[in-house]
Amino acid sequence: MPSFRQIYSLISRWFRPPDDRTTFTLTPRHRKRFLVNLSHKILYCPIEKNSCTLFKRILILNSEFSEQFIASTLDPHTFLKQTGLMKPENATPFQDADYLRFIIVREPLERIVSAYMNKFVRSKRYKIALKITQDYRRQFDQPYDENRLLNFSEFVQHISEQTNQEMDVHWRPQIDFVRHEIELFQYKVTMERIAEFISILGRRMGVELDASKTANQNHYAAYPPGMNFHITPPEEMRQLKSVPEADSLLTPELRHVLTRRYARDVELHQECVDSRWPG
């Protein structure tokens, strides 16, 4: 059984300000998940479906790798994956008080609807959509047709039964990406405050940033109630001029299921809403 001194030491270590955590250990997960801009001392934890394409592009274009990135003509995700650049090599970005550390957090249910729209409705050829549909049909002994993907209700049923590790990153709980590091971030940014934060980021870098150029944007529209979009095949929704708003797919039952499954993300999002930024 640990002594009182050992317990006290452990608790004290984790309740110190981030810059005093001299025992921070950089792991392969940190190198894989986090992105560091050494030129402007910025640390970022990208989370899929949370404007990560935009912020990766900003950090790359304002780094020493800007010309290499432009010449490659690759998207930010592919560029970073192929080159292995901008990964943290030591614990300094996680501890140094001179670093600006930020994370973008999205309202959990809205993020799930957005992920479904992108992977199932906008295109029918995403491998993950085909695989999930195939797994679901097999589980319930239903015939599989690659031209008949899961509707939103079926999708929710499927992911609600998965573990975090089994989930695709686009709907894996956001808390799973930051774990114990959440307190390291001075800026916990919700989607509603992105424009405000980009201004801060621009001043940090000494450049004027354009927040309007984001990738994978859906154009949402309000539809009359009772449209039953939660059971509408994605092939039919693909014919709509505009994507239904999240509330059009979230029935009370589905909202309850997702709120329970993503309970920790709901707490995380509220923590970010309530958080205060430096200055």
Image (spheres, rainbow, N blue to C red):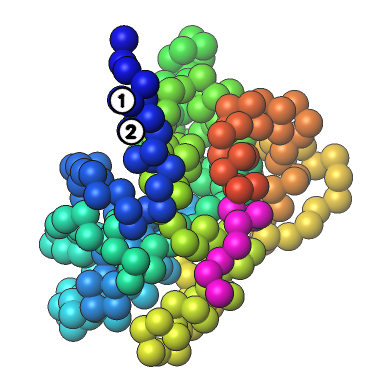
Q: For the N terminus, which image quadrant? A: top left
Q: Is residue 101 magenta?
A: no
Q: Are marks 2 and 1 in contact (CB under 8 Å)?
A: yes
The residue that mark 1 highlights is 6
Q: Residue at x 30, y 56 (%)?
A: 94
Between marks 2 and 1, how big is the CA–CA gap? 5 Å
Viewer-closest of 48 and 1: 1
Q: Residue at x 16, y 55 (%)?
A: 90
Q: Is residue 273 magenta?
A: yes
Amino acid type of disc 2? Ser
67 displayed left or right of 187: left
Q: Position of residue 171 (x, y in %)?
A: 48, 40
Residue range (magenta): 272-279
Magenta: main secondary structure: loop
Q: Which mark is residue 162?
A: none
Q: Which corner quadrant of the image does residue 80 belong to?
A: bottom left
Q: Position of residue 132 (x, y in %)?
A: 43, 29
Q: Is residue 77 visible?
A: no
Q: Which corner quadrant of the image does residue 89 belong to?
A: bottom left
Crowding at mark 1 (Cα within 10 Å: few <14, some 14-19, many 20+): few
Q: Residue at x 46, y 22 (%)?
A: 162
Amino acid type of disc 1? Gln
Q: Which mark is residue 9?
A: 2
Q: Position of residue 32 (x, y in %)?
A: 23, 48
Look at the picture and state if 250 lies above or below 89.
above
197 displayed left or right of 56: right
